[in-house]
Amino acid sequence: MTVDTLATTARFQGRTVLVTGGGSGLGRHIALAFAAEGANVVVAGRTLAALEETVALVTAAGGTAAAFTSDVSRAGDARELVRLTAERFGGLDVAVNNAGVFRGGAPVAELSEADWKELLDINVSGVLFGLQAQVEHMKANGGGAIVNVSSNLGAHLRIPGVAGYAASKAAVAALTRAAAVDHIRDGVRINAVSPGVSESSMSLLPGETEAERAERMKSESPLGRISTGAEIAAAVLYLASDAAGSVVGTDLRIDGGSAA
């Protein structure tokens, strides 16, 4: 990922954005995109060194960011993360629940208990705990917007060998829509994006290079390529922006037509 000077616009000027899983992949792209549009960005995850790399990229490009380690599978960590974010920047306006793990390669009958538990703990409970802490703060402080990162695998598409992951992401899609209805009258807009194969190491097959992935997608995707990190980030920023003021409980699929 190259570093360019952030071309600040007014869309998120002065707002504070929290991105979980912000140390790499789509989370890093999303964090940089928000910073480019004027936001104070907090990135969170389990590995401080990776988070600090994201902060360094934002800072080098002229933006403002901070990093906090956090385990999304712990409700207490989710609450503490919101508290630290508000303490650092004075509030929380936008949250992106992006942290997630992928476990696959086995049919349902061979899915291990450990993999199943980790998928639910991080991909589902992690989003739930994040939502609870974020909504509590936003409800008490004038509202806000939340975007959950789901997947085209789950509610939209199924393929062999990834039942656990698909089930966890389908749960994120359902949780997003339910939470959106529950909390829109609290001033909190909640939506989701569902990427397909994209500019993230999670979309690489075991032992596959980025060049090999690009070749594979020429035949697997109707679009003929992966979705870029910038394209996913653009969708997240739209859902978090004032332009999406009446968009509530949507699940925006971004996968080049794979689940069309």
Image (spheres, grey):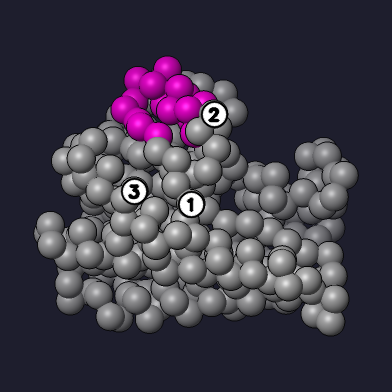
- Tell whether 228 sits left or right of 18: right
Q: Which mark is residue 81?
A: 3
Mark 1 secondary-structure assignment: loop
Q: Magenta region: which residues?
A: 51-67
x, y percent for residue 158: 72, 76
- Tell whether 112 sits left or right of 43: right
* Up-down relation of residue 70 to residue 172 (above or below): above
- Tell whether 189 sits left or right of 27: left
Mark 3 secondary-structure assignment: helix
Residue at the image point whose x is 32% and y is 75% from the top: 180
Q: Residue 194: in sight, yes or no?
A: no
Q: Counting residues from the N terminus, which is met first, the one under dot 3 or under dot 2?
A: 2
Q: Which mark is residue 71?
A: 1
Q: Residues within 10 Å of mark 1 (few under 14, many from 20)?
A: some
Mark 2 secondary-structure assignment: helix
The picture quadrant where one finds residue 2 is top right
Q: Name the residue tied to disc 2.
A: 49
Q: Counting residues from the N terminus, which is met first, the one under dot 1 or under dot 2?
A: 2
Query: Foreground: 222 or 217?
Result: 217
Residue at the image point whose x is 34% and y is 48% from the top: 81
Question: Identity of the amino acid at label 3?
Answer: Leu
Residue at the image point whose x is 39% and y is 53% from the top: 77
**3D distance between C-alphas at marks 1 and 3:** 9 Å
Q: Residue 102: in sight, yes or no?
A: yes
